[in-house]
Every structure is written in C-alpha cells, then in structure tokens.
Amino acid sequence: MKFFAILVSVAAIAVAIPLKRTVAQVETDLRNIGTQVTNLDNSINAFPNSGGSLTAALAIHTDAQNLVSSVNTANIDVQDMTDVSESDGRTILGIVNGFEPTIIDALNAIVAKKPAFDALPLGGVSALVKQDLAQLATATEALENSLINEAPADLKPQAQDIQSAVNAAFANAQAAYASA
C-alpha cells in the first residue's frame, strides 16, 4: 500500500512540473507548418476555377484543419520555450520567412477561388472556408504574438513585418468571405 501511495505521489509531481520546450522542437513545429502551408496552397491552387468537386473542396478543409492543429501546437511549444539565443531567433525567423510567401499565396488563391466554391452544387462550402479562415487567423495571430514575444529585441521589427503582411492577407481573405 505504501508503494502505491509513493507511486501516486511521484506521478502527481511529475504531472505538475511544466515541460519546457526546446528551440529545436519549435523549429521542428515551424518546419511542419511550412510543409502543411505548402500542402494547403497546392490544394487551393489545384482547385479548378469551374467544375470543382466537393471532394476537392473538403480536402482543402481537411488541410486547413490540420494546419490549425499544428499552429496551435507550435504556439504552445513557443510559449513553453526557454532561452532563445540570437542565433536561434535568426533560425526561427528564417523558417517563418521561408513560408510567408506561401501563406500569402494561399490566402490570395482562396479569394480567387470563391466563385468556384460558390458554384458547387452542394452549398455551404464558402461558409466552411469562412470558418477555416477564422480559425486559421486566430491560431496564426496567437503564434505570431508568441514568436514576437520570444524573439530577441533586434529581430522583433522583422518579425512584425512578417506579421503585418500575413495579417493583411488574412484580412483580405476574410473580407472576401464575410457574406458567406
């Protein structure tokens, strides 16, 4: 019985100790996001301007939901990250800077594809895109803010420039689907 009580106590203490994430974990998270952003961008760009299928539209939705999950995980890891050096900050900034154009392309493409989504025989696809955009924007903004908070002071302006460009593209896309 004493053994069980000690085991429960040790387990409770282990659960109570917060896990610190390493910069390497955050870099892995961000590379994963980059891959998923590319997948989403490819799915959006592959959707035809007319005659698209519900299956292809739902694949875009699935890609968006997977990306939301990955962005949320990365945000938790960034918030739990410790000791971001100048070199680490530059690496992180480089990773994000690498997929920023792809994010913006995906958001511009989703705007261009709205008439194709609206034309699908089963309605509601544009409303689903609107929902995906809202979830992605919220998750992305949280991650952006966390990354900027953890960035070395001299890198914050560059990070804020990326944030401004991405947020402007989100605002444009959300405006296009506002009535959906």
Image: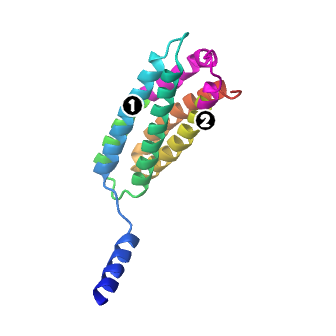
Residue 168, x across and y down, in percent: 57, 30
Q: Is residue 86 visible?
A: no
Neighbourhood count class around disc 2 (C-alpha, 10 Å): few under 14, some 14–19, many 20 upward:
some
Residue placed most toward the observer, 23 or 153: 23
| Span shown in magenta | 101-128
Against 80, is 180 above or below? above
The residue labelled by disc 1 is 99
Q: Position of residue 40 (x, y in %)?
A: 44, 28
Amino acid type shown at disc 2: Gln
Circle on res. 131 = 2
Is-magenta flag for residue 142?
no
Residue drawn 40% across and 58% down? Answer: 80
The quarter in which the N terminus is drawn is bottom left
Residue at 39%, 31% in the rendered image: 99
Q: Nearer the viewer, residue 124 or 67?
A: 124
For residue 35, above or below residue 73: above
Indicate left or right for 26 with 48 as reference. Answer: left
